[in-house]
Amino acid sequence: MGNIYTKKMRKTHTILIPEMMEYHFDLISGAFINAGYKMEVLNYKNPDIEETGLRYCNNDICYPCILIVGQLISSLNHGIYDPNKIAFLIPQTGGACRAGNYYFLIKKALKSAGYENLPVISLNMSGSEKHPGFKLSLKLGFSLISAALYGDLLQSLYFCKRAKEKEEGKALELYNKWNKILSIDISNNKSIKKHAFKRRVREVIDDFNKIETKNIDLPKVGIVGEIYIKSCELGNNNLEDYLKKNNADYFMSGFTSYCMYIADTTVDQFFDKHKLNPFRFINKFVVKWLNKKQKLIYKPLKDNGYVFLSYLELKKFADEVISFKCTTADGWLVSAEVMGLIEAGYNKIIVASPFGCLVSHVCSKGIMRTIMKKYPNSLVYSVEYDSSLSPVGRESRIQLILQS
């Protein structure tokens, strides 16, 4: 079967992973390299990506899927990659949204485009869609956790320093420097042990502490929403660049809290179905262990005056306004992030979501009125993204937020 990723392909094929999180996926690719895979982030951005995605999907599919499919097939059509030497990996969390079908949609699209032999790997925790040449190991799992934590660290430091830096571009320079160093560390199996990890965290924070800042008042904007749309510049039409041009001080919650949310809510759903299953206790232990790992970055960050929203903090915020049973897709996490950012001083909130995403409307927008009553001096505004929506219309809405 030509579309299966075999053990021999580990030496001959490069695994492409879509650019889904600007501050994390270079580090995550390092974790796969450390585990013996050839890995590359697909950061190809050709103007025909949307058009290609719509041609091989349709406009009933959610916007992130259209972009991921379009990004892959467009790069193949333009000869960027040899389809006989690559595989494609798509992370999947499951759940009752269209993202649960990405694996099959991508395979169908590749077949329609003439690339049906290209292996598609689903990165999931359920063990479904197995490939003999790819497996999740403990070593890879630990490396991925380190990569996610480092990504959150660099993202928080960059956001907190960028807007008020005296020397323009200094925060980005340090971010690029440490992103490269930490990616190499992870790919070489360094900085994964606790003592080495803590030392690196201290070195990174000390370096960012040297950036001199100006005492100026800027609009403070929080970015929340569906994980792909809020985190990927392809998905949000370069939202960060637009906020930079308009002199906004913006912040976004990290990736590890999202991972912990998925793990935690999956455990709860599992409990409901298997009350007496012994694995429930193991899963609970894993969530507690992840909380301890996250503390390795958020404690030193907060001790040095930086903003970071830990998972435990977010869960406390959510408990005030929404049921923990609201776990479809990003569920209660979006509401928790809104409240966490407002409490951190970011009183203008952009909720970035794919147009027509039912779970975003129900779980995210459905609770916003309650949050606005709790925080009457803050502004929470939904901005939707889709191939049929005008960028000018979105930017005018963002301007309303900035000028209010």
Image (cartoon, rainbow, N blue to C red):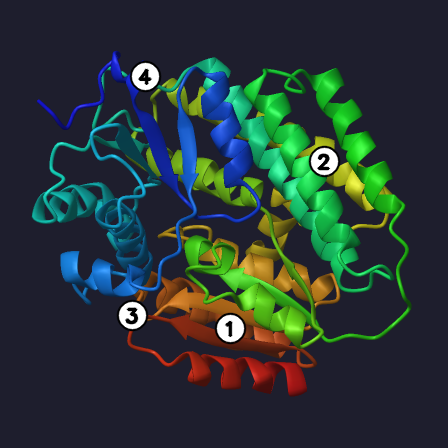
Q: Dot 1: few (<14), some (14–19), or many (≥20) neighbours within 10 Å?
A: many
Distance between the alpha carbons at the discs numbered 3 and 1:
17 Å
Q: Mark 3 points at which residue?
A: 356
Q: Name the residue under label 2.
A: 297
- With respect to residue 8, does 386 lie above or below? below
Q: Is mark 4 on a helix, strand or loop?
A: helix
Q: What element carries label 1?
A: helix
Name the side, left or right, on which 225 lies relative to 275. right
Q: Can residue 29 be seen in this view?
A: yes
- With respect to residue 108, does 225 lie above or below? below
Which amino acid is tagged 1? Met
Identify the residue at horizontal 50%, vertical 18% (top origin).
Answer: 34
Closer to the camera in the image, 43 or 129: 43
Numbered disc total = 4
Q: Name the residue under label 1.
A: 368
Q: Name the residue under label 4.
A: 10
Which amino acid is tagged 3? Gly
Which amino acid is tagged 4? Arg
How far from the left and from the top, in percent, is residue 60? Answer: 18, 65
Distance between the alpha carbons at the discs numbered 2 and 1:
30 Å
Question: Which mark lies nearer to you, 1 or 4?
Answer: 4
Q: Residue 199: name its quadrant.
A: top right
- With respect to residue 201, does 59 lie above or below? below
